[in-house]
Amino acid sequence: MRGLLVVVSGPSGVGKGTICEVLCRRNDRISLSISATTRSPRAGEVDQVHYYFTTPERFREMIARGELLEWAEVYGDYYGTPRAPVARMLESGRDVILEIDVQGALQVKERTPGAVLIFVWPPSPAELERRLRGRAKDSEEQIARRLEWARTELQAVPKYDYVVVNDQVEDAVCKVEAIMVAEKCRPVYFAGLGVVT
Amino acid sequence: MRGLLVVVSGPSGVGKGTICEVLCRRNDRISLSISATTRSPRAGEVDQVHYYFTTPERFREMIARGELLEWAEVYGDYYGTPRAPVARMLESGRDVILEIDVQGALQVKERTPGAVLIFVWPPSPAELERRLRGRAKDSEEQIARRLEWARTELQAVPKYDYVVVNDQVEDAVCKVEAIMVAEKCRPVYFAGLGVVT
């Protein structure tokens, strides 16, 4: 059976990275997709593990050839999801998780009809603010900007297939797992099972 | 949060009754809907527990007043699902399971947009035949007719939301539970959670 393509998005600080990590750790048939980027590696980042690090020339070539499932330019750097490794994993029956932003998610949905879009949201806006402060990564101004941006992203929710409220990580991971079990019960999958007379 | 209306159908002998029974037994927020019928009670059947036993006159009145979510006439007897008790349970936040045939399921889908349709199917047609024989309820002719009818019912699968293959009951129940968790993560439910700014 072909694997499932699952797109996970949501505001900064909501904990989507942790959800995806736990999900992949306890399900060995699920892989996290690796993004390509033109930005420089940060300390500890390994090519082909954390990102496919590449040049702007090569990235623009990938765009022109339609080799990306989605891409965006952020503050002068390109980020995108190479199509070929994702397609290979899906064909081999592995499920693939894409942890990408809302714009990327909507691009994937448009180009890949079978993709399942999940939006991760905090139990409340106040809790999101608390988590952003807790990371101690951002200035007050950045936190305000991130909260504002979260409200904008929220407008895209009706275009998503599912919303998972991340109150407790364990509970949120179970919900994503349930969504994946359910999606594999879709009639379109059944047709491929060979159980039909 | 409003409960979920789940319709479970599938061929005779596939084990949908067992799945619904186990599901309700281990989830105290899930109720099985009780059908109304004009046929006579069989030994051991209790009014308002197994069926609402009623008269043809009263049944036709319910049809005329739109008091049924779905109904059918089978060998001269009426069977149907009264709308009011289902609506009351859903509003109180309970999930309701309707174990009904394909024709009834499609009627519910048409009249109740939020209903989730699940089709239960055996791992193979040969296994369905084996299960029908194992029940020792039907003549050879009836078994042949049931198998033929199962093939007809299968045509309705594309109109269903999900297909659950009943290989092991435990596994099938887990799939139905996963479907119910997933359906409660739909954006339309999220809007009712009150977590949106």
Image (spheres, coloured by chain):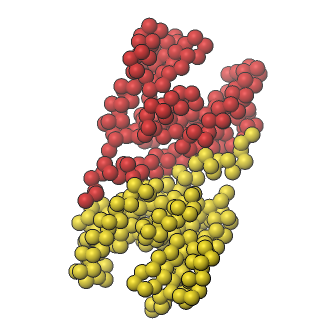
Chain colours: A yellow, B red
B4 lies above or below A100 = above
B90 lies above or below A127 = above
Q: Residue at x 38, y 58 (%)?
A: A157
In this orientation, which residue lies closer to the viewer: B35 or B104?
B104
Q: Residue at x 51, y 19 (%)?
A: B79
Say which quarter of the image contains residue B159.
Answer: top right
Left or right side of B20 for B62: left
A123 lies above or below B18 = below
Residue A123 position within the rendered picture, expressed as x and y whole percent measured from the top left? 30, 60
Residue A124 position within the rendered picture, expressed as x and y whole percent measured from the top left? 27, 61
Q: Residue at x 69, y 27 (%)?
A: B149
In the image, farthest residue toward the front: A64
Residue A1 visible to the viewer: yes
Say which quarter of the image contains residue A32.
Answer: bottom right
Residue A99 position within the rendered picture, expressed as x and y whole percent measured from the top left? 47, 70
In this orientation, which residue lies closer to the viewer: B2 or B29?
B2
Left or right side of B78 for A91: right
Quadrant where the N terminus of chain A is found in the figure: bottom right
Say which quarter of the image contains residue B112.
Answer: top left
Q: How many discs mark residues in the rendered view?
A: 0
Quadrant where the C terminus of chain A is found in the figure: top right
Left or right side of B193 for B78: right
Residue A166 visible to the viewer: no
Residue A69 position within the rendered picture, expressed as x and y whole percent measured from the top left? 56, 70
In this orientation, which residue lies closer to the viewer: B5 or B20?
B5
